[in-house]
Amino acid sequence: MPHTLVLLETKVITTLQKLGLTFYEAKVYATLVATEGTTATVLSTESKVPRTKIYDVLKRILPAPHIHIIYILRIFQPSNSALLSEIVCGLRHERANSTISYGRT
């Protein structure tokens, strides 16, 4: 099962990149949605984006379309995770439809 989670995470990151985010931006945004808000230090650790880059990445994703981050008491939260939810649901649906059927012919 962990391998499946890694593949799903990779597809989410790739899809976010296709929407215009950089690799680091996609990782940070996906982590924000997964954690439902966290500090920059935890965000850096969880997303595996270097701590020295985390604030620059956050500054870049703030003006991106469909991405809003609420900054309250140094806790970063995505204001609307619907976009990522739609991507994940689409990927799960795509994966379910691409399974091979071994029924009788």
Image: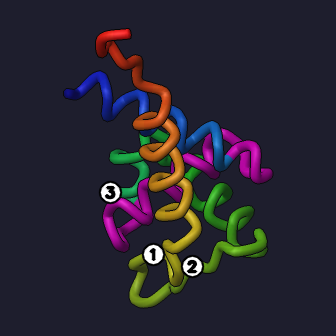
Q: Are marks 2 and 3 in contact (CB under 8 Å)?
A: no
Residue 69 is tagged as 2
**Direction from residue 41 to residue 23 in the image, left or right:** right
Quarter assignment of residue 17? top right
| Placement of the N terminus among the 4 image quadrants | top left
Classed neighbour count for the residue bearing mark 1: other residues with Cα under 10 Å, few (<14), some (14–19), many (≥20): many
Q: Amino acid at mark 2?
A: Ile
Q: Amino acid at mark 3?
A: Val
Q: Which label's residue is closer to the chain start, 2 or 3?
A: 3
Q: Are marks 1 and 2 in contact (CB under 8 Å)?
A: yes
> Which secondary structure dominates the residues rendered in magenta?
helix
Which residue is under mark 3?
42
Colour scheme of the picture: rainbow
- Front residue of 13/59: it is 13
Residue 41 coordinates in the image, percent (x, y): 37, 57
**How far apart are the alpha carbons under marks 1 and 2?**
6 Å
Q: Which residues are magenta?
A: 17-40
